Amino acid sequence: SYNKFRHNTSRDALIISFADTFTSLLAGTVIFSILGHLAHELDLPVEKVVKSGAGLAFVSYPEVLAKFDFVPQFFAVLFFLMLITLGLGSAVGFMSAVTTTICDSFPDTNKKLIIKICCAVGYGIGLFYVTPGGQIILEMVDYYAGTILILVLASVEIIAINWIYGTSMVTRDLNFMLDANLSVYWRFCWGILCPILLPLLFFYALFTQAGVPNIPPTAQVCGWILAILGMLIVPVHLLLSVIGEEDGEFRERLVETVKSGMFLSRLKDTFTPNNSWGPSNLQEKKDWQIYQETTDLYQWLPKCIRRKIQRAPVDEAA
């Protein structure tokens, strides 16, 4: 994010969450009430009227709009303008994530050139979706890269942040950044609910095969290869962090790290914050370090529990 350090991200997150939720509820209510009415008019069950996937947007709903008594052309234009707006919004968000990562990695490179290359590559990849087999590719990418992969990466991310770095430390950092005092609700969501719920959703989708698209076995194999390649980003990046201090090729650095007996210690170090961790502004970083020293991680807990936690290290030392 390029927001200022003290930007009220908590307010933005709440606004986006509520807007997204109510938009989904409104869209679901409108769309499925109309499709239900269409099923009633045609005297057919809803599953016979609704075509899942892209067919819902490009086949079923246009059929409903065509049956409007009052200027159906106007509502058809509004509907497809909405689809274009949603598509452009998603494309801008995805492309910004890619271009920002590349620009930050290569700051001396012309940003306009990077954006042009990324847009051209994205356009070239998008052409596959308008081929005769484009629907199969779309469903494959949507499920394996858009559901399975995202669930795995989100689970790893939330577990790393809250169970390795620590929910209390995350909350303390956010309290300092937002100049607020986040409630126990956020600690519960970050520390317990999300780290348990996301992996459960992944295993539920994996074992029940819920939402698996009806595509050829070859496409399913390609989908799993795509998902596994995305998952490998985490262990590969972790391994590169462990062997980063050695010189030479990847294999040579890995062998040298293992032979030196430093592999486990460096692996442990990768899970701890380094000296660059913290606000980028020097004054804010100093204030943050002072805040860390003067603020108890467990001040939100009842006093009786806090005393037991504080006594534990003393008892072990004794």
Image: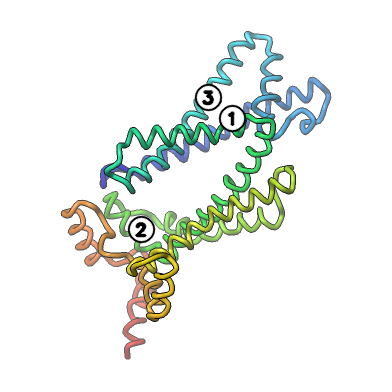
The answer to the question of whether label 1 and label 3 lie on touching residues, with beta carbons closer than 8 A, is no
Where residue 6 is drawn, which disc sits there? none
Give the residue furthest to the left.
Answer: 283
Q: CB atoms at circles 3 and 2 under 8 Å apart? A: no
Secondary-structure class at tag 3: helix
Residue drawn at 51 percent across, 29 percent down: 86
The residue mark sitting in front, 1 or 3, is 3
Mark found first going from the N terminus, 3 or 2: 3
Expressed as whole percent of the image width and height from the top left, the position of residue 171 reads: 35, 58
Q: Which mark is residue 171?
A: 2
Which amino acid type is shown beneath numbered disc 1? Ala
Q: Name the element at disc 2.
A: helix
Q: Quadrant of the N terminus?
A: top left
User: Which residue is located at x 35 percent, y 66 percent?
Assistant: 244
Percent across and percent down for residue 317 are 32, 88
Residues tagged 2 and 1 counted as in contact (Cβ below 8 A): no
> Which comes sooner in the sequence, label 2 or label 1?
1
Is residue 312 visible in this depiction of the protein?
A: yes
Separation (CA) of disc 1 from disc 3: 16 Å
Amino acid on which the number 3 mark rests in the picture: Ile
Of residue 87 and residue 112, the one placed in the foreground of this image is 112
Q: Is residue 268 above or below residue 19?
A: below
Q: Residues within 10 Å of mark 2 (few under 14, many from 20)?
A: many
- Density class for disc 3 (Cα within 10 Å; few <14, some 14-19, many ≥20) is few
The residue located at (44%, 62%) in the rendering is: 160
Which dot marks residue 84?
3
Instruction: Choose between 269 and 67: the one closer to the eye.
Output: 269
For badge 2, the amino acid type reads Thr
Task: Give the residue number, with chain letter if any, for mark 1.
Answer: 27
Above/below status of 227 relative to 262 = above
Q: Is residue 192 left or right of residue 58?
A: left
Residue 273 higher or lower than 231, as above or below: below
